[in-house]
Structure formats: structure tokens, C-alpha cells
Image: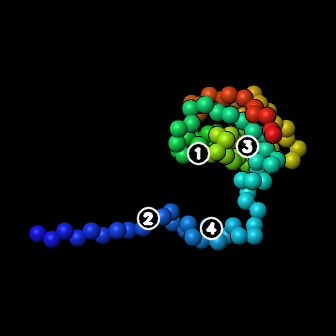
Amino acid sequence: MMLIFVSFALACPGEEHAKSDKVGKVDAASVSQANGNPIVVGGISCSHCVEEVKNAIKSVEGVKDVSYDTKENVFYVVMKDGYSFDEVKIKTAIEKAGYSYKGLKNKN
């Protein structure tokens, strides 16, 4: 009996394209982090959780962008021009999605 092993290199679709697109460009997440309100959310255990929380936050009127820093476990919320950060509305949206709002994180 002969066994044949085949190895496949698996990667996310478009990974190489995505890497080349970042050369010489500013990453949108870094812009959000520089301009956003950093918040901490409890109950995040996977990328699906991150997406659920991002969508919940984006549903709040006036939210322009949301990014997540995996190293710091912090969401950055950027508001549209003319809107101010409403912590109560953000907290309510997060809790309605089933996660716990832990508060604002001090920017360093």
C-alpha cells in the first residue's frame, strides 16, 4: 500500500493582493485609531464577536467608522462630522448585541 501526502498552502483569498495594496498607503484602521474614541468591550472571544460588536456600534447614528486593535483589545469609534461621541448610545448598542461595555480607555 502506498500513501501519498499532498500539501496545500492555504491563505485568505486576495492576501497577496492586500499586502501589495498597503505599500505606500495609510491603513484605514490606523487613521481610526488616531482619531477614534477607544472603548473596551467584554466578551470578545473570536473574530465573529469583533464583527458583531463593530456592526452594533456602526448602527448608532453618527458613527462613521469602527476599527479593532487586536493587540490592545480595544475598539476605536470615529464619529461623522457634526456628531459627538454618545457613550450611552454606544453602550446600549453593545449590550443589546450581547456584550459588556467596559468603558473608555485612556489614550496614551
Q: Earlier in the sequence, mark 3 or mark 2?
A: 2
Hey, what amino acid is under mark 1?
Glu
Residue 46 in view (yes/no): yes
Which SS class for mark 4?
A: helix
Q: Nearer the viewer, residue 53 or 62?
A: 53
Residue 2 in picture, x, y percent from top left: 15, 71
Residue 89 in view (yes/no): no
Question: Quadrant location of the C terminus?
Answer: top right
| Left or right side of 97 for 5 | left
Residue 76 in picture, x, y percent from top left: 73, 43
Q: Report the residue marked by disc 4.
A: 19
Q: Earlier in the sequence, mark 2 or mark 1?
A: 2
Which SS class for mark 2?
A: loop
Q: Report the residue marked by disc 2.
A: 10
Residue 36 in picture, x, y percent from top left: 79, 44
Q: Report the residue marked by disc 3.
A: 76
In front of the other: label 1 or label 4? 4
Q: Are marks 4 and 3 in contact (CB under 8 Å)?
A: no
Q: Earlier in the sequence, mark 4 or mark 3?
A: 4
Q: Report the residue marked by disc 1.
A: 51
Mark 2 neighbour density, 10 Å: few (under 14) some (14–19) many (20 or more): few
- Give the spatial CA distance, label 1 vs label 4: 21 Å
